[in-house]
Amino acid sequence: MPRLRLRHAVRAALAALVPLALLGAFTGPAHAAPEAAWPEPVPVVSHVETTDPVVFITIDDGWYHDPAAARLLLDRRVPASLFLLPGAYSYDSGYFHTLLDQGRSRVENHTVDHPDLTTLDAAGQKAEVCGAREQHLAQFGDGPRLLRPPYGTYDATTRTTARECGAKALVTWTYDLTTWGQWTPPTPRLKAGDIILLHFNETVAQDLKRALDAAEAAGLKPAPLREYVPE
């Protein structure tokens, strides 16, 4: 074959191969594994759909360790969900060990420092939620399974972060019966599945008694929230 014709043949062959090579570079191997999926977001629960005659007592933060509230929880065998901050039990963890060891309460997740989680990026939310879970597990030997975001505020990242940090649901509330200062919220007529929010503050004992009396008046009994929340 003359040299000129050979040169043209080689050039034509290269021109045909280059697009194929570029196509492979852009598409990658056909057997490439897909990227790992982000955890499935947890459900958000403010009321439990149930026909059982039950309500759910939840108590947040943990700064005020009221012995009268502890006696009420223990004497009435109330299965309260305690959404605690690690700093609130670091100076007196025995108060909560007694509630867990001698009663029916369980510790749940309320973050490390009580921030508005929607102001944090994914890494910041993970540090708050997973960090609290690790501290609860180390202190009480029972990892939390529910997350209550501070102020009840959350976004899509919170729901996926909760799953990544071992929670099966994000829990808000149906009624807040906490007394703040001179203001006491009205007592509602409770219904089956309602979630009651209280706080470990100076009025926690009287607020807890009012919640329990309201449940009794409605023919309802406190039940363990963790057992009623779906995965």
Image (cartoon, rainbow, N blue to C red):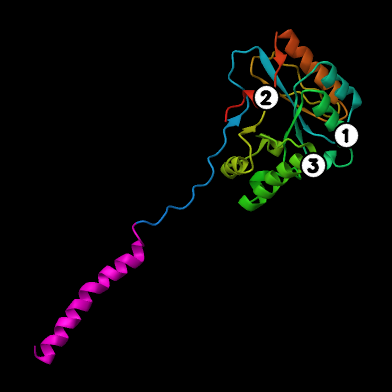
| Distance of label 1 from label 3 (alpha carbons) | 13 Å
Question: What secondary structure is marked by label 3?
Answer: helix
**Element type where label 2 sits in the image:** helix
Residue 46 versus residue 2: which sits nearer the camera?
2
Label 3 neighbourhood size at 10 Å, few (<14), some (14-19), many (20+)? many
Q: Around disc 2, counting alpha carbons within 10 Å, would you say few (fewer than 14), some (14 to 19), or many (20 or more)?
A: many
Q: Is residue 218 above or below residue 41?
A: above
Residue at the (33%, 57%) spot, across then down: 30
Q: Residues within 10 Å of mark 1 (few under 14, many from 20)?
A: few
Mark 3 vs mark 2, CA separation in Å: 21 Å
Question: What type of secondary structure mainly makes up the magenta span?
Answer: helix
Question: Mark 1 and 2 residues: CB-CB less than 8 Å, in contact?
Answer: no
Q: Quadrant of residue 223?
A: top right
Please name the amino acid that badge 2 sits on: Leu
* Residue position for label 1: 94
For the residues labelled 3 and 2, say whether their Cβ atoms are less than 8 Å apart: no
Q: Which image quarter: residue 53?
A: top right
What whole-number distance in Å separates the C-alpha atoms at marks 1 and 2? 23 Å
Amino acid type shown at disc 1? Gly
Q: Amino acid at mark 3?
A: Pro
Residue 182, image x and y in percent?
Answer: 86, 26
Mark 3 or 2, nearer chain start: 3
Q: Which residue is mark 3?
A: 86
Q: Which residues are magenta?
A: 1-30
Residue receiving disc 2: 225
First of labels 1, 2 by sequence position: 1
The verdict on residue 158 being magenta is: no
Furthest residue in direction bottom, as rendered:
3
Residue at image point 64% right, 43% down: 165
